Image (cartoon, rainbow, N blue to C red):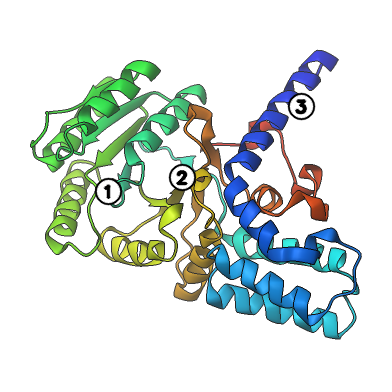
């Protein structure tokens, strides 16, 4: 790479890092205010520092079980004199947090099936339609042809919103207007994509409360109809979760997974909450259930580039207060060529 190209790459990675750090600012500030002397570093560890840390983790929705496990490990290391100051404690905390998330991070891979059909499900207001538009941009930039299915036929503005994204990204949108049968819309979209040799179908669905049995049954219907048209479809069923709902995300995951078999997660609106720690509670829940559902993406802002592939080391480094000394380089920042979706 030329010197100019290398500097451009560094600038882009720096910009991506800056947006991630900014997007997690509210949660990081919550942690910083709760950690007290811990972020000052190089001080002897005492009970007060450990209690401050435990409270800070709980306040950011890391979850009781995850917090308990982390504190037990840190306390044990302190007692064995493996950690002798708060700076060392902080660094150990960063590694433990990363370890919780690492098993659930992998890229979304577009397989060989054509069209490759991806469903987006979730409750009202989590940002499914916007997420579809952002992902369409990324897939198109990666060389895939994309078609959008406006399967959310209940919300008045949903079809219009998805059509706007389609026009913006120059990708076709299949729709039938408000009140149409959602299964019919998605069926037509998959047929159209096959006829046009399009690589990927991104299918929007109406937001629905996980406790509404009739709406969940309708979602199952859409899945069955598409499966009859294209064996193995949908190839991915992505649950979009709003980070701001905190622990309620766990019940959403459980119910949607039981209904349609979730294959991946996208956590949105991390920039609008001080409870981004819920991602650790989600990871713990997945580990306990034996369901290795990956977190493919996180949303850290309104911009089209603010839907980011989930990378635990970067996430933890951006989440923790900078004063304690975990730097972006230590968080494993990698070239953009390793980010995003790939085709096998």
The residue at which mark 2 appears reads as 269
Compared to residue 313, the image places residue 255 above or below, namely below
Percent position (x, y) of residue 258? 29, 66
Residue 42 visible somewhere in the drawing: yes
**Closer to the camera, 23 or 47?**
47
**Closer to the camera, 266 or 342?**
266
Is 251 displayed left or right of 14 in the figure?
Answer: left
Percent position (x, y) of residue 18? 67, 35
Q: Earlier in the sequence, mark 1 or mark 2?
A: 1
Percent position (x, y) of residue 69? 64, 78
The residue at which mark 3 appears reads as 10
- Give me the residue at 70% from left, 31% from top: 13
- Look at discs 2 and 3 and give the one toward the viewer: 2
Is 287 displayed left or right of 162 in the figure?
Answer: right
- Look at discs 3 and 1 and give the one toward the viewer: 1
- Give me the residue at 30% from left, 21% from top: 164
């Amino acid at each position: 790479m030329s010197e100019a190209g290398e500097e451009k790459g560094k600038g882009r990675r720096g910009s991506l890092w800056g947006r991630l750090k900014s997007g997690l600012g509210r949660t990081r500030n919550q942690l910083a205010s709760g950690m007290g002397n811990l972020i000052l570093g190089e001080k002897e560890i005492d009970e007060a520092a450990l209690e401050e840390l435990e409270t800070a983790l709980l306040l950011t929705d890391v979850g009781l079980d995850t917090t308990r496990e982390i504190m037990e490990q840190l306390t044990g290391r302190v007692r064995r004199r493996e950690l002798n100051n708060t700076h060392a404690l902080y660094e150990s905390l960063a590694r433990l947090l990363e370890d919780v998330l690492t098993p659930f991070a992998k890229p979304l891979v577009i397989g060989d099936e054509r069209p490759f059909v991806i469903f987006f499900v979730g409750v009202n207001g989590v940002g499914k339609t916007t997420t579809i538009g952002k992902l369409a941009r990324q897939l198109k930039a990666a060389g895939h042809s994309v078609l959008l299915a406006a399967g959310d036929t209940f919300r008045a503005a949903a079809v219009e919103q998805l059509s706007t994204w389609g026009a913006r990204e120059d990708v076709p949108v299949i729709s039938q207007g408000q009140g149409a049968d959602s299964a019919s819309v998605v069926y037509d979209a998959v047929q159209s994509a096959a006829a046009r040799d399009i690589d990927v179908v991104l299918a929007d669905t109406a937001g629905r409360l996980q406790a509404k049995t009739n709406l969940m049954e309708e979602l199952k219907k859409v899945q069955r109809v598409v499966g009859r048209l294209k064996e193995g479809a949908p190839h991915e069923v992505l649950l979009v979760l709003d980070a701001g709902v905190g622990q309620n995300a766990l019940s959403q995951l459980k119910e949607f997974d039981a209904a349609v078999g979730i294959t991946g997660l996208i956590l949105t609106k991390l920039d609008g909450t001080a409870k981004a720690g819920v991602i650790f509670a989600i990871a713990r829940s997945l580990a306990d259930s034996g369901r290795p559902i990956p977190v493919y993406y996180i949303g850290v802002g309104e911009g089209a580039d603010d839907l980011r592939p989930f990378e635990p080391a970067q996430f933890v480094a951006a989440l923790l207060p900078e004063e304690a000394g975990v730097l972006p380089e230590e968080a494993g920042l990698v070239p953009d060529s390793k980010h995003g979706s790939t085709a096998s």
